[in-house]
Image (cartoon, rainbow, N blue to C red):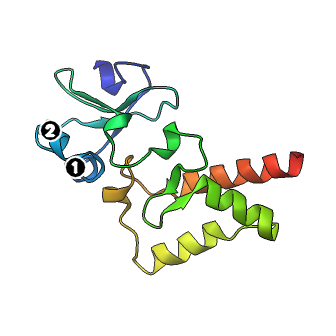
Amino acid sequence: MAHGKCPSCNERGRPVSARTVKGNLKEPLRRDLPATGMRFCRGQQCPVLYFGPDRWRVDHDAAKSGVGVKDASDTALVCYCFDITRGAIRRELHRDGHTDVVGRITREIEDGNCDCETRNPSGKCCLGHVRQVTALIASQAAGS
C-alpha cells in the first residue's frame, strides 16, 4: 500500500477508524481487522471498500448495505444515518419540484441525531455527498 493508495485503483484512501469498519462490515469480517492503518477507497468503479497494511482488503460486497459512492442505483443510500436513498431524492424532486433533504439532514445533525463515524462507510459526514447527489439528480431532472 504505497502512501495510502488503494491496491486496486490507486486512489488515495481516506483513513477510517475500527469503529467505522466494524459498523459497516458483515459479521464474520469484523473480527480480523488490522490494529491500525485502515483506509476507505472512494473509487466509484473500484471493488475495494477498505484496505490496509499487509495486503488486507475488503471488497464492497462485504458491506452490510450498499455503498452509495460505489452504487449509482436508486436504492443506494446517500445518507446512512437517516436512510435516504438516491431514489427518495429523485421521487421528492419529481413529486414536489424541489427537495429539502439537505435542510432535513442539517437539522438532524444540529440536533445531534447522526452517527456518521459508525454508519457511513467513509467514516465522515454524508452532507457533502448528499449535496452533490441532489444537484446531479436535479440537473438530470431539469434536462429531461
State the image coordinates of residue 50 (x, y, percent, origin top left). 31, 34
Above or below residue 9? Residue 25 is below
Per the image, label 2 sits on a secondary structure element best described as: loop
Instruction: Please give left or right for residue 11 compared with residue 3 in the image.
Output: right
Q: In the drawing, does residue 128 fall left or right of residue 100?
A: left
- Image coordinates for residue 74, horizontal then vertical, percent: 61, 49
What numbered label is drawn on residue 33? 2
Q: Assess whether mark 1 and mark 2 are in contact (beta carbons under 8 angstroms).
A: yes
Q: Residue at x 38, y 60 (%)?
A: 116
Q: Is residue 11 visible?
A: yes
Name the residue nearer the viewer: 20 or 2. Answer: 20
Query: How many C-alpha atoms fall within 10 Å of the one at disc 2: few (<14), some, or many (≥20)?
Result: some
Numbered label attached to residue 22: 1
Q: Amino acid at mark 1?
A: Lys
| In the foreground, 35 or 8 | 8
Position above or below: 117 against 71: below
Q: Label 2 to label 1, Cα distance in Å? A: 9 Å
Secondary structure of residue under mark 1 = helix
- Look at the picture and state if 41 lies above or below 68: above
In the image, what residue occupies the spot 82% across and 51% down? 141
Q: Quadrant of the N terminus?
A: top left
The quarter holding residue 25 reads top left
Name the side, left or right, on which 32 lies relative to 59: left
Amino acid bearing label 2:
Leu
